[in-house]
């Protein structure tokens, strides 16, 4: 009888905690339902073509650049800052990469395509990180608002793009370099990476629970955490099965998955991540706790610059060219992806997972509307409506919390 009563009590506690989690994370589950709804609408309007393996493959490839930028933008917004230059920084890096491939390495390393591709990637990441460091220094140590600094950075980068390209298109479709964003992972390796990703999800969940227990935080029912991880694992399995039936996992998506896993770990299980959220939650309390706010903000902008460099390399490889319009609008897509994914405009709240879902929603809308031949003007109108609704939801849910 005692065991029976205990079982009933455990079930009651589980249901109570599950309801509490659903209530507190209603915004996250709302965007998941929104994504499913978007896919369902486009599936029926395109007679199933929208969810065909080839289109799913192209959809995830197209979201990759925005997702790289959004992964860094989450921490920028969480700390109460903004970066309006990431789109043009990615564009400038793509132009630099194209220039190095077409003009510099072609001249000095004409018969070394692999070496030239590696050197181009290294140089591009350094350019992105350096620009992020410059902006971060001005924002964190010279106390200039991030809005002003990054807006100025956007204008500066627009000018630099025009100077480097001289108004012309630069080819970036050389062997090895083009494979960065246009190649595919062999099917066998795709399943191996799938298993590794799922194993990471379970490891990260148990690691997070261990850290919470270590620091005295209350733990929610383990079955709730397992339910969330199992759901994510099923999504990964379905995705890998789908794209493997076409050509395999796309190289940029694999790179994005690795980046996302690293960023999730950093934000959830490191001092760097905890300090970032502490600054956004209560800046004065974080300062009085001994956190170097200037140092943290500087590091976050360097990280943002590095991820912009990654996005720029992928952009140049995917498009195959460095153009005068490179990176236009990506900063808005990245910010929108974060907000759609639950990152609060007021700071202190946001997740990498949410930003990835937000980037996928934006890419899903763009792809579906293009397949339906909706005029570009109406595409912008619909994106604007979705973004405003997301901000209203963010304010509403945070006020209730």
Image (spheres, grey):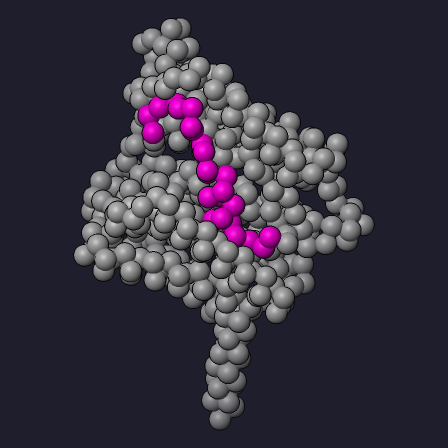
Q: Residue at 38% across / 58% down in the picture?
A: 35
Percent position (x, y) of residue 254? 37, 40
Q: Is residue 48 left or right of residue 210?
A: left
Residue 187 appears in view: no
Percent position (x, y) of residue 291? 75, 45
The vertical placement of 100 against 151, above or below, is: above
Most extreme residue toward the bottom, as rendered? 1
The vertical placement of 308 against 268, above or below, is: above
Percent position (x, y) of residue 175? 29, 20
Q: Residue at 46% across / 44% down in the picture?
A: 333
Percent position (x, y) of residue 47? 18, 57
Q: Nearer the viewer, residue 346 or 284?
A: 346
Q: Is residue 231 left or right of residue 19?
A: left
Q: Residue at 60% across / 52% down in the picture?
A: 345
Q: Residue at 33% across / 40% down in the picture?
A: 61
Q: Is residue 34 left or right of residue 214?
A: left
Residue 44 appears in view: yes
Q: How many marks?
A: 0
Q: Which residues are magenta?
A: 319-345
Most extreme residue toward the top, as rendered? 108
Q: Reply yes or no: does residue 327 show up in magenta.
A: yes
Q: Nearer the viewer, residue 318 or 91?
A: 91
Q: Reply yes or no: does residue 165 show up in magenta.
A: no
On the image, which quarter does residue 248 sit in?
A: top left
The C terminus lies in quadrant: bottom right
The vertical placement of 194 against 39, above or below, is: above
């Amino acid at each position: 009888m005692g065991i029976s009563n205990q079982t009933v009590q455990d079930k009651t506690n589980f249901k109570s905690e599950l309801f509490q989690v659903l209530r507190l994370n209603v915004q996250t589950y709302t965007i998941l339902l929104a994504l499913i709804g978007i896919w369902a609408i486009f599936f029926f309007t395109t007679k199933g073509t929208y969810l065909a393996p080839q289109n799913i493959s192209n959809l995830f490839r197209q979201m990759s650049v925005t997702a790289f930028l959004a992964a860094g933008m989450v921490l920028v917004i969480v700390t109460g800052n903004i970066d309006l230059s990431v789109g043009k920084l990615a564009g400038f890096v793509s132009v630099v990469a194209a220039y190095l491939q077409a003009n510099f390495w072609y001249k000095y390393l004409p018969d070394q395509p692999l070496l030239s591709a590696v050197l181009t990637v290294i140089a591009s990441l350094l350019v992105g990180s350096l620009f992020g460091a410059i902006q971060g220094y001005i924002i964190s140590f010279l106390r200039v608002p991030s809005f002003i600094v990054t807006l100025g950075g956007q204008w500066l980068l627009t000018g630099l793009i025009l100077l480097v390209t001289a108004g012309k298109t630069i080819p970036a479709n050389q062997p090895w370099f083009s494979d960065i964003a246009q190649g595919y992972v062999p099917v066998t390796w795709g399943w191996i990476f799938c298993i590794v990703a799922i194993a990471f999800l379970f490891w990260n969940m148990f690691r997070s629970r261990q850290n919470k227990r270590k620091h005295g935080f209350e733990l929610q029912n383990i079955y709730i955490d397992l339910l969330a991880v199992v759901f994510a694992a099923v999504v990964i399995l379905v995705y890998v099965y789908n794209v493997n039936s076409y050509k395999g996992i796309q190289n940029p998506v694999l790179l994005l998955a690795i980046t996302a896993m690293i960023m999730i770990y950093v934000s959830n299980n490191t001092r760097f991540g905890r300090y970032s959220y502490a600054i956004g939650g209560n800046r004065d309390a974080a300062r009085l706790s001994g956190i170097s706010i200037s140092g943290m903000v500087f590091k976050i902008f360097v990280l943002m610059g590095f991820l912009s460099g990654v996005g720029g390399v992928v952009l140049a490889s995917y498009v195959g060219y460095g153009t005068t319009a490179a990176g236009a609008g990506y900063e808005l897509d990245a910010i929108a992806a974060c907000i759609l994914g639950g990152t609060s405009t007021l700071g202190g709240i946001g997740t990498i997972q949410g930003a990835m879902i937000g980037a996928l929603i934006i890419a899903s809308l763009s792809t579906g509307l293009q397949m339906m031949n909706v005029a570009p003007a109406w595409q912008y109108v619909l994106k604007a409506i979705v973004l405003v609704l997301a901000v209203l939801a963010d304010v509403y849910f945070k006020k209730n919390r």
